[in-house]
Image: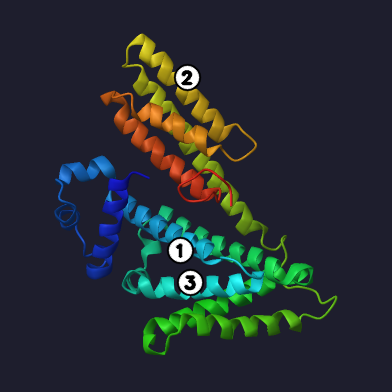
Amino acid sequence: MDERRVQFIEIAMKLFAEKGYHATSIQDLVEAWGISKGAFYHHFSSKEELLLAVLQHYSENMMADLTAAAGGGTEKEQFIRQLAAHFSHVRQYKEFLHMVMSEQLPKVNPEIERYMFRQHGRLFLWYCTRLEEVYGEAIRPYVYDAAMMVNGIVRQYLFYFFFHQEMFNAEEAARFLMRRFDAIVDSFAAGERPLLTKESLAPWMELEERERQRQRERLASAFSAVREAAKELGAKQMDDVLEAVAALEEELLERHEPPRVYLVEALLLYLRHQQAPSLVAALAALSQEMETYRQLNGWERGTWKRH
């Protein structure tokens, strides 16, 4: 993501945390950013789009922190460190998260509501993966039930520590809860029928797949917009740009494997260096749609390699 856009998003996050999303005006934002109100709409089509970008930025930071916290050692020790990092992350963004809860942000518009719902699902599936990695084959038949319990317990403790920071010790809390998770896993009787199965969660999974397909269509539309903008170039430059766009589109939408980071970055760099005013807005929109598509597919932040 463009560094200036990231800076705008982080400043907006602080403003929303301090004043509240609804009380923060576009004028407040542009004054903090040091740009004109007209320039705001060059970067974001609306305050709602900015809010979505802020929520995406927060979620990506959180998942990146969880990934980075794993380190070495046993899977259980890594999971403990990740739980501690999750607690610390919530403490770091306390004011922002308080605003998210108090202002009922899912009601801002349907796109934000869908995004926040998907993020809950994303974290739930992360718990499923990590529990299987920690407990192995024994947990597999009950992984969805175990993940639901673990997720619920963590959320409630996070909420409690949210308002009682003086009693908060991230690592101590993580180790305490890990012992509880051990007991939950041990409590499943051999042959016991799980309440939650892959089939029972299918509507949730299908929602994610529908959103991924919707984003594929948006990304394809963004590629079409770049090709349309390229028609204003000279014949030789237009041919070169269209060839690069075709290669980039094939890499993202037509391969059966995750896109190759070096090729995606090289093609984007080439397109951005064309110094063609007609391409600027279309390329900016394309980059944003690519970033959203990357998030939906679970590829690592800042690269195009799958987790």
**For the residue marked with disc 2, what is the amino acid?**
Glu
Where's residue 287, x and y in %?
Answer: 40, 38
Q: Quadrant of the N terminus?
A: top left
Residue 267 sits in quarter? top left
User: How far separated are the C-alphas under marks 1 and 2?
Assistant: 37 Å
> Which residue extends farthest front?
72
Residue 70, horizontal then vertical, whole percent: 56, 66
- Determine the image quadrant of residue 140: bottom right
Position above or below: 170 against 291: below
Residue 193, by quadrant, is bottom right
Q: What residue type is labelled 1?
A: Met
> Dot 2 corresponds to which residue?
243
Name the front one of labels 2 and 3: 3
User: Which mark sits nearer the N-terminus, 3 or 1?
Assistant: 1
- Viewer-nearest residue: 209 or 301: 301
Q: For the point 56% across and 77% down, which residue is it? A: 152
On residue 62, which mark appears? 1
- Comparing 199 with 50, the one in front is 50
What's the residue type where badge 3 is placed?
Answer: Ala
* Mark 1, secondary structure of its residue: helix
Residue ID for mark 3: 85
Q: Residue at x 48, y 71 (%)?
A: 86
Q: Crowding near pointer 2: few (<14 within 10 Å), some, many (20+)? A: some
Asked whether the residues under the numbered discs 3 and 1 touch, taking CB atoms below 8 Å apart as contact, a structural biologist would say no
Q: Nearer the viewer, residue 54 or 73?
A: 73
Using the rendered image of the protein, determine whether residue 113 is visible from the camera's viewpoint: no
